[in-house]
Amino acid sequence: MYKNPRSNNILLNLGIESLNEMQEMAQDAILNDPNVLLLSPTGSGKTLAFLLPIFEMLQPEVNAVQCLIIVPSRELGLQIQQVWKKMTTDYKVNVCYGGHNIETEIKNLSNPPAILIGTPGRIADHIDRETFKTDTIETLVLDEFDKSLQLGFHEQMSYIINRLPKLNKRILVSATSDIEIPKYTRVVNPTVLDFVPHEKENENLSMKMVVSKEKDKIGSLFQLLCSLKSESAIIFCNHRDAAERISDTLNEKGIYATYYHGGMDQEERERALIQFRNGSVSYLVTTDLAARGLDIPEMNHVIHYHLPSKEDEFTHRNGRTARMLASGTAYIIVNESEKKLDYIDYQMPVLNVDNAKSLPKPPEFQTIYISGGKKNKLNKIDIVGFFSQKGKLEKGDLGLIEVKDFVSFAAVKFKKVNELLRNIKDEKMKGKKFKIEVARNVIKKEEEK
C-alpha cells in the first residue's frame, strides 16, 4: 500500500491494492522535484500517478485554486475529473472547456475548487475575465501536452503560464517520447520518467493484415467484423467524412455502429461515446481523436481502415487494446493500390475473412435519454429507483447510467425498453415530470432533416 495513510484510503476507494512501478516513481518525483516529465503509454495509469501526489500537496486552509491541469480536449478533462471524484477527497474540482455554458462555469468558480481542469482556450478566457485567482496556483499539469501543441494551442498555453506568478511545480505528461518542450513552459532540466516502450513492441499485441481486393475497403471491413464473434471494436480512419460514411454503411448492412470526430458538436460527441461505452452500439468508427485521452472501455480489437502517416499515431491507436497485461489484436486493412508505409511490417500474418458472413449479434442494451441531471438534483440512485419501482425493471435489466449536468443516459435491456416507457409514461421522478425517451443515434446531418 501507499506510504501515506490518507492515500491508502484513496486506493481503497478506487479498489486498487497497490501502485505500479511507474506510479510509485511518479509519486516520489512529483513530491520532491520542481519539474517532472512523465512519459507512459495510454492506459498505464498516468492520471492517478499525478493526482495522488497533488492530493498530498493540497493545503486545506487555502480556499482558492491550488493546481491547474491543462488538457487538449474536453473528454480528457472530464475523465480526470471522474478519477478525482472516485478518489473521494474533501477537495472540490471543476472542469472548464469550450462548448460548455460559461455562465455556469463562472458560477461554479465563485466557490473556487482546489483543482481546476480545462482546455487552453477556455482557461485563458477565464483568466481574462478574472473569474479565479491565479496567484494561489503553485502546481501546473500539462496532460497530453504534445497533443495541445499539435492542435496549435501555443499562444494560449504561453499566456496562461505567464499569468501564474507563484508556480513552483510543473508536471508534463504524455504517452509519447518523441516531443520537444517549448521554452515558455519554463521546464528546465526536468526529472524524466520514461516508460514508453521503444525497441520492443507490446508483446501482448497481435498484428494481422486483411487484404482487400477492392479499393473501397468497406466490404472487407464488413467481413472482418463478421469474423470477430460479436466482440466490440474501434475502427480508425483518417478523415471525418470517411468515419461518417463507414458508420452509415455498416448500419445499412445491419451492424450497429456510430462515428466520432472533431467536427461534431459536443452533444453529439458525448452521445456517441455514451452509447459505445454502455453497449448500445458495438463499433466506434473514429478519427485519431479517439486514439488517446478518452474514457472508453478496453477493446480486444483495433481496426485500421486507413493507416496514419505517422508511426506515433499508429502506436496511440493500438494503445486502445492490449493494455497492461491484457491481450488484444490490431488489424490493418490494405489494398494493393495503397502506398506502403515504412513503419509497417507487411510480413505480418494475413487473415482471410472471405467466408465470414454471419452478422454480429445486435447490442443487448439501448440508451434511454432523461431530460434532467445533476443540476436538477438527479443522481444514479434516483434513476435506478424510479426505473425499478415505476418502470418495473429487474436489476439485470439496467446497465451503465451516466448523469450529466442537465441530462442523463441509462442503458436498458433492448427487450425491456418498450415496457419501461409504457410503465413510466405519466409518472414523476422526485416530484417532477421529465422527458424520457430512446436516445437518438448519431447520424449524418442531412439525414436528420
Image: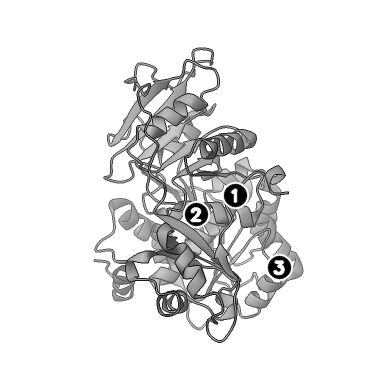
SS at badge 2 = helix
Query: Considering only order in the chain, which callout, 2 or 3, is on the residue closer to the N terminus?
Result: 3
User: In the rendering, at what x and y percent does residue 358 appear?
Assistant: 37, 33
175 or 433: which is nearer to us? 433
| Residue of label 2 | 275
SS at badge 3 = helix
- On residue 102, the disc is 3
User: In the rendering, at what x and y percent does residue 233 appear?
Assistant: 41, 41
Locate residue 244 relative to residue 343 in the image: left or right: right
Picture layout, residue 230 above or below residue 132:
above
Packing grade of label 3 (10 A; few <14, some 14-19, many >=20) is some
Picture layout, residue 106 above or below residue 285:
below
58 or 370: which is nearer to us? 370
346 or 168: which is nearer to us? 346
Can residue 237 be spotted in the picture? yes
Query: Considering only order in the chain, which callout, 1 or 2, is on the residue closer to the N terminus?
Result: 2
Question: Alpha-carbon distance for marks 1 and 3?
Answer: 26 Å
Circles 2, 1 touching at the beta carbon (< 8 Å): yes
Q: Amino acid at mark 3?
A: Ile
